[in-house]
Amino acid sequence: VTNRHIPRLHLIGPLGVVEPEQFIDVAAAAVRGGCDAVHLRLPGARTSEVLPLARLLRERLAGSGVTVLVNDRPDVALIAGCGGVQLPETGFSVADARLIAGEVLIGRSVHDDVSARDAARQEADFLVVGHIFDTGSKLGTPGRGLTWLHDISGATHLPVIAIGGITTERIPEVLAAGAHGVALGRELLMADDPEQTAREARGQIDTFLDERTATDAAD
Amino acid sequence: MTASTTTIDLRTGLRRYLITDARAGSVDELVRRGAAAIEGGVSAIQLRAKGWTDRQLLDAARELRTLCIASGTLFIVNDRVDIALASGADGVHLGVDDLPVADTRRLLGPDAIIGYSPETDDDRLAAEAAGIDYLGVGPVFGTATKADAGPAIGLDGLRRVVERTTLPVVGIGGVTIENAPLAIEAGACGVALVGAIFFADDPAAAARRLREALP
């Protein structure tokens, strides 16, 4: 079992939902509200767009304790000095990513238990698993649901970060299904007040963990 | 970098330079066409397959890398420094939209080959100062492969860059087996081709004809 600290409240963006520059502000607000990981995900973007944004993000969030993860690109993470890489199912192996980016936090996105076990064998630090609920970013593909999340969370020892249509209200049931934490995209990117939304999400996580600790103690 | 082929004289290695294309459709087909071109005598291969997944790129890179080591062919990866590192490529080829040259050099080390396609003279000078090893210059002739390549600079444009730089220059853009010798006459050490070899009915035969034209 990993001894790394695995963040529990992840922001993922800009995803084409907000402008790249705006994403820096949303990320800063979300981190003030309690996000402890920010994933830079710009599907289809040129390297010349991703690298400056990764650098800006890291500089803006320096000193906050948050981990900035670059999606797909271990070379960009290394050059920008980011603390992590998030690998898609079709991306680098964990070993290759470590070879390039060094001892950074490495997450692997998976969509079934076979990929989850494969990621565990490769010693990923955590899994991003989804999508759990129906979401506007995956129209036409229904959410996989909490039972599925429970099964995949039990498939490996790796911490699972659940993603996809997760509102702050639903965080307790997601954690109860076995998730270590949650990743929010549109839920934070489109929030009127991302800091407040992140604070509510963090409150839900902390409350759930406190109650579980209390329950464990009572047993 | 394992760099087993970097001892090849760079100008010689860049002479017959094949660039792959995503329209091969699959890793197997890209590698098959690349292998045929190597058999026919290209001296360098650049893996370019825009839009492919990292896994596809890496699979193709590793297969091409193995073929290139066995044949003494230079192996260069377009844009992706991470793919170059993971596959042990001889180097990367960068453009203005890719990773900065200085950062790339820091990651790949002093022995890696870094090529660069400048858009302006200032751009070229900055890249040279940052430590590139060769230039890709064009489009020399009109090109059908890259819609965004801009107007052709012609053989005069190619010659102008050759006169201003001490680095090896590879002519690119609309190069065919027929017009390739013209680019060499204009001072290029080599030519980069995509369609004329990669999409030829018989890439090995096309590469052989190129070798006859540019021995």
Image (tube, coloured by chain):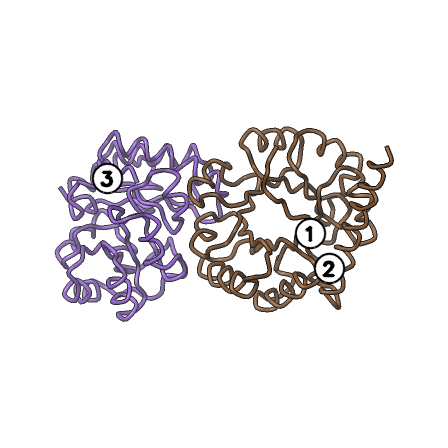
Chain of the residue under label 2: A
Q: The brown chain is which one?
A: A
- In the image, taking residue A213 as reference, residue B36 lies left or right, namely left
Q: Marks 1 and 3: which is nearer the front?
A: 1
Residue wearing tag 2 = A198
- Check if mark 2's residue and mark 1's residue have beta carbons within 8 Å: yes
Residue wearing tag 1 = A9
Residue wearing tag 3 = B42
Instruction: From the viewer's side, name the closer residue of A60 and B76.
Output: A60
**What's the residue type where badge 1 is placed?**
Leu
Chain of the residue under label 1: A
Circle 2 SS class: helix
Marks 2 and 1 sit apart, C-alpha to C-alpha, by: 8 Å
Residue A195 drawn at (x, y percent): 72, 65
Marks 1 and 3 sit apart, C-alpha to C-alpha, by: 51 Å
| Picture quarter with the C terminus of chain A | top right
Residue under disc 2 on the same chain as residue under disc 1: yes
**What's the residue type where badge 3 is placed?**
Val
